[in-house]
């Protein structure tokens, strides 16, 4: 039974506004650089009103990270051991790219937390994340042993997908400045598909 009080429509809206304002502030300035005044202004609320919902900046930051981690691992969870190996890995890469497109602030929040030494989520990285990556690495090694995809290190394969997809969120300004176009994601999707098909295709296996 849930003993949490039911929020009114206004309370739900205000809480969402605070979290959105916090996401803006933290994704730009990091935890240390962001202030409650900045978050309150972005949320369109007074600072005392903000503190009614969240007692501290740390509480807002923690709520954002908890929400982020609830969805951040979903794309890798969805990798199916019974699916076509190449298509499963390509679909994972595309899901990560879509997350960078749709959740750029969340990606930068995550990046800032990592650059700060992961003070809030270090246990998650060393626990659930590591366990999930190890689990999927076993699946990929099984595909490699069966000759279904080219043999490579599955951990570094996953790392490369993270780096290649999250780059478009974390370095959005740089990407758009170089390309001189509004939306780089369509081209990125084609490139990622081409790159990983070439990498994983057993026809290119050099038997290393």
Image (cartoon, rainbow, N blue to C red):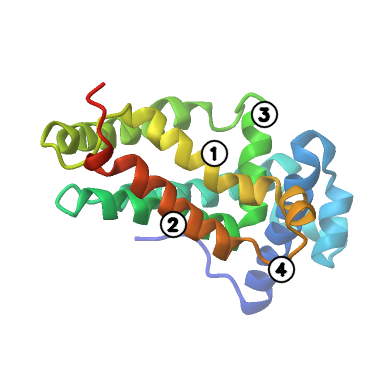
Q: Which residue is mark 4?
A: 14
Quadrant housing residue 35: top right
Is residue 79 at least partly visible in the picture?
no
Vertical placement of residue 177 versus 140, above or below: below
Q: Earlier in the sequence, mark 3 or mark 2?
A: 2
Task: Point out the frontmost of discs 1 and 3.
Answer: 1
Is the residue under label 3 in contact with that under label 1 (CB below 8 Å)? no
Cα distance between the residues tagged 4 and 1: 35 Å
Quadrant housing residue 145: top left
Vertical placement of residue 13 versus 20, above or below: below
User: Which residue sits at x=43%, y=57%?
Assistant: 95
User: Which residue sits at x=80%, y=34%?
Assistant: 32
Identify the mark at residue 115; answer none if there is no mark. Answer: 3
Is the residue under label 1 in contact with that under label 4 (CB below 8 Å)? no
Q: Which residue is mark 1?
A: 163
Task: Point out the frontmost of discs 4 and 1.
Answer: 1
Q: Residues within 10 Å of mark 1 (few under 14, many from 20)?
A: few
Secondary element at tag 4: helix
Q: Is residue 206 left or right of residue 117?
A: left
Cα distance between the residues tagged 3 and 2: 25 Å
Residue at far top of view: 208
User: Which residue sits at x=69%, y=27%?
Assistant: 116
Is residue 149 at least partly visible in the picture?
yes
Q: Which residue is mark 2?
A: 94
Q: Earlier in the sequence, mark 4 or mark 1?
A: 4
Cα distance between the residues tagged 2 and 4: 33 Å
Quadrant housing residue 18: bottom right
């Amino acid at each position: 039974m849930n003993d949490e009080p039911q929020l009114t429509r206004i309370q739900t809206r205000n809480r969402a506004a605070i979290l959105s304002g916090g996401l803006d502030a933290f994704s730009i300035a990091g935890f240390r650089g962001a202030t409650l005044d900045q978050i309150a202004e972005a949320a369109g609320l007074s600072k005392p009103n903000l503190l009614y919902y969240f007692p501290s900046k740390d509480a807002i930051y923690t709520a954002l990270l908890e929400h982020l981690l609830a969805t951040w691992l979903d794309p890798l969870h969805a990798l199916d051991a019974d699916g076509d190996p190449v298509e499963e890995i390509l679909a994972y890469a595309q899901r990560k790219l879509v997350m960078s497109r749709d959740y750029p602030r969340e990606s930068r929040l995550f990046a800032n937390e990592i650059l700060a030494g992961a003070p809030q989520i270090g246990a998650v990285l060393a626990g659930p994340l590591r366990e999930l990556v190890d689990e999927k690495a076993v699946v990929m090694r099984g595909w490699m042993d069966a000759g279904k995809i080219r043999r490579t290190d599955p951990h570094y394969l996953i790392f490369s997908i993270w780096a290649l997809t999250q780059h478009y969120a974390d370095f959005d300004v740089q990407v758009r400045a170089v390309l001189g176009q509004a939306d780089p994601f369509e081209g990125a999707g084609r490139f990622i598909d081409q790159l990983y098909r070439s990498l994983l295709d057993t026809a290119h296996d050099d038997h290393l």
